[in-house]
Amino acid sequence: MENKETDGKDVKYYRLSEVEERNSFKSTWIIINNKVYDVTKFLEEHPGGEEVLREQAGGDATESFEDVGHSTDAREMASSMVIGELHPCVEKPEMFLLMPLLLCISLRMTGTSLPNQQIQRPYRKAQAGGQTG
């Protein structure tokens, strides 16, 4: 878990592996649109039944949640169960491939520059499957 402060609020980031461990009756977490929800106390109250949430426990429920077409009230209720967000890079290696591009954009916006080889190195490592060299 990692914390980041944005707009005065402390955002907790969870790895996918941490969410996957929370798939029991004692602790049930799901992911919807990269936000992590603790739905443990809501299991018995869920209008669609407890089993619907249990099937998604420890994983990404975005598609199922959106397919049902939840109401505004349901979305507001769900927002009270958010405990954090899925970490944007750790479990998604494709994000690592975008890092050099994001670095270039960031550097250009700030007027800073780096030698080309420093920008290329992370991309080459990602292409090699994260191996150093």
Image: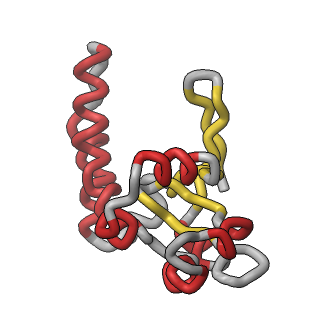
- Which residue lies most toward the top here? 111
Q: Quadrant of the C terminus?
A: bottom left
Residue shown at 55% from the left, 53% from the top: 78
Please say if 113 is above or below 45.
Answer: above
Q: Looking at the picture, how far across and down is residue 47, in whole percent? A: 54, 70
**Which of the two residues, 128 or 4, is positioned nearer the viewer here?**
4
Would you say 57 lies left or right of 100 here? right
Would you say 41 lies left or right of 126 here? right
**Which of the two residues, 81 or 3, is positioned nearer the viewer here?**
81
For the image shown, how many numbered marks are present on the structure?
0
- Which residue lies most toward the front here? 47
Q: Looking at the picture, how far across and down is residue 130, in whole percent? A: 38, 68
Q: Is residue 133 visible?
A: no
Q: Quadrant of residue 3?
A: top right
Q: Quadrant of residue 131?
A: bottom left
Please say if 55 is above or below 73.
Answer: below
**Which of the two residues, 38 or 123, is positioned nearer the viewer here?**
38
Q: Is residue 57 visible?
A: yes
- Which residue lies most toward the right here? 26
Residue shown at 25% from the left, 60% from the top: 124
Q: Looking at the picture, how far across and down is residue 13, in whole percent? A: 59, 51
Residue shown at 66% from the left, 56% from the top: 1
Q: Looking at the picture, how far across and down is residue 24, in whole percent? A: 70, 84
Would you say 130 lies left or right of 37 here? left
Residue shown at 73% from the left, 82% from the top: 25
Q: Quadrant of residue 127?
A: bottom left
**Which of the two residues, 98 or 132, is positioned nearer the viewer here?**
98
